Structures are given as structure tokens and as C-alpha cells.
Amino acid sequence: MAGVSGCIKYSMFIFNFLFWLCGIFILAVAIWIRVSKDGQELLSSGESGMNPYIGVNILIAVGATIMVLGFLGCCGAVKESRCMLLLFFIGLFLILLLQVAAGILGTAFKSESEKILNETLHKNVELLSATTENAEVFQKALSEFQEEFKCCGLVNGPADWGQNFEKYSKSCECPDTQLASCISYDNKYVYNQPCISFIKDLLKKHIIIIIGIAFGLAVIEILGLIFSMVLFCQIGSK
């Protein structure tokens, strides 16, 4: 019985140590995005109505919470503290409930999210022909996207660029004039396909990855709940 208890104890410690490291990583990345120059450029690209720092602040909160829970779990396992193990169990259980609630809400509002995304992309077409600093950041980002995915413009094709077309036309020029996917526009041979479909496909792939990670985390969290409760009960029976 002591051997089984010791095995669960050290398994619990290793699990929570890795959990704690994940929290540190998430917190470090979020803080880097919040304070670094590159992170500021990333956050300021685009002119959506949503505050871009909200997502980063959520990441900071998540990272800090995971760190605290990992610390409680490690200390609770090593010191065999029922109080710490109980706090760890409650905290992890609440996180699991929030994940489930987020998944349900995400499924329920999927069509609404797609509508908002579509409206945002159509609204950002205006940035391609603008001359503001924020617009230039967005233009450079889309220019790189065009070059990689072989598309031109955001929604309506090369016409989206307006007066800025000459400046960014090189990123969507066709290397082969015989390609059926290319057209002649403003004395240049460019890709006819706008980038909106590629952006949507890319976001869908990322969402699938996020769902996979969420399921993986849910399995890990359930294991953590089982380990903590078993150890909690065994310490109480001593």
C-alpha cells in the first residue's frame, strides 16, 4: 500500500511540475507579447473594434493561474498536505468547467463568429487603400501573406489596394503569365484569387488545432483530478 501511495505521490509531483512549467511558458509568452516591440506591432495590426490586449491579458491570467495550481499540486504532493491538494482539485475542476463552457458557447455561436469574421475582413479592405500607420502595418502583413499563399487583395482582388497597388503589387505578381489563376491588372500580371478564402481556411485549421489541444488538456486535467483525489483520500486514511 505504501508503494502504491509513493507511486501516486511522485506521479502527482511530476504531473504538477510539468503543469507549473506550462504555466511559466504561457505567462512568459503573454508578457513578451505585451511589452516587446514585435508584440506591440502584432497587437496593433488592424483596426477592429475589439481591444487587442484583452486576449493577451487573458493569457497572462491563465498562465498565472496554472503556475499557482502547479505550485499547490507540487507542494501538496511532497508535503502530503490535504488542504493544498483540495485547493488544487477545486482550481483544476473550475478550469475544466470553464473549458467545457467555452466549448459549448463556441459551438452555439459558431455561425455568429463566422459572420463577425466575415464582416471584419470586409471592413479591413479599407485599410489596403489607406495611408495611416496602422493601415501600413496591416498592408505589410497582407503583402507577406499574398506572397506565401499566391493571392491578391483581401476580398475583391487586386482592386482592393486602390492607389497602394503599385507599392505592393510585387507580392502578388504571377511568375508565369500562362497560369489560368492570373489576370492582367494595371499593366501587371497578378493572381486573381483574393486572400479571404485562404485566411478563412487557415483560421479553420488553427481552430482544429486549438480544439485538439483543448481535448488533450482536458485529459491531462482529468488525470490531475484523479491523482489529487486518490492521494487526498490516502493521506486521510493514514
Image: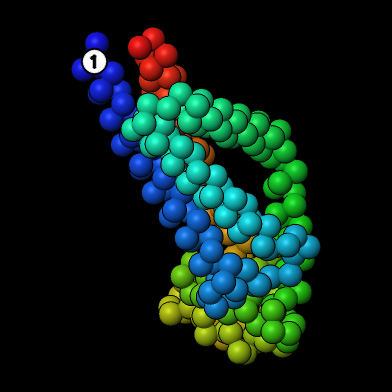
- The image quadrant where one finds the N terminus is top left
User: Along the line of sight, which residue is nearer the eye, 138 or 156?
Assistant: 138
Q: Is residue 57 above or below residue 193?
A: above
Residue occupying the point 43% across, 55% down: 25
Q: Is residue 224 left or right of residue 164?
A: left
User: Along the line of sight, which residue is nearer the eye, 236 or 138?
Assistant: 236
On the image, numbered disc 1 is attached to which residue?
A: 2
Q: Is residue 68 left or right of residue 128?
A: left
Residue 3 point in image, percent of width and height: 21, 17
Q: Is residue 159 above or below residue 207?
A: below
Residue occupying the point 31% across, 26% down: 9
Q: Secondary structure at mark 1?
A: helix
Residue 83 point in image, percent of width and height: 50, 27
User: Along the line of sight, which residue is nearer the eye, 180 or 109?
Assistant: 109
Residue occupying the point 23% across, 15% down: 2
- Rate crowding at label 1 as few (under 14), some (14 to 19) or many (20 or more) other CA atoms within 10 Å: few
Q: Could one spot residue 192 in this view of the protein?
A: no
Residue 224 point in image, percent of width and height: 42, 28
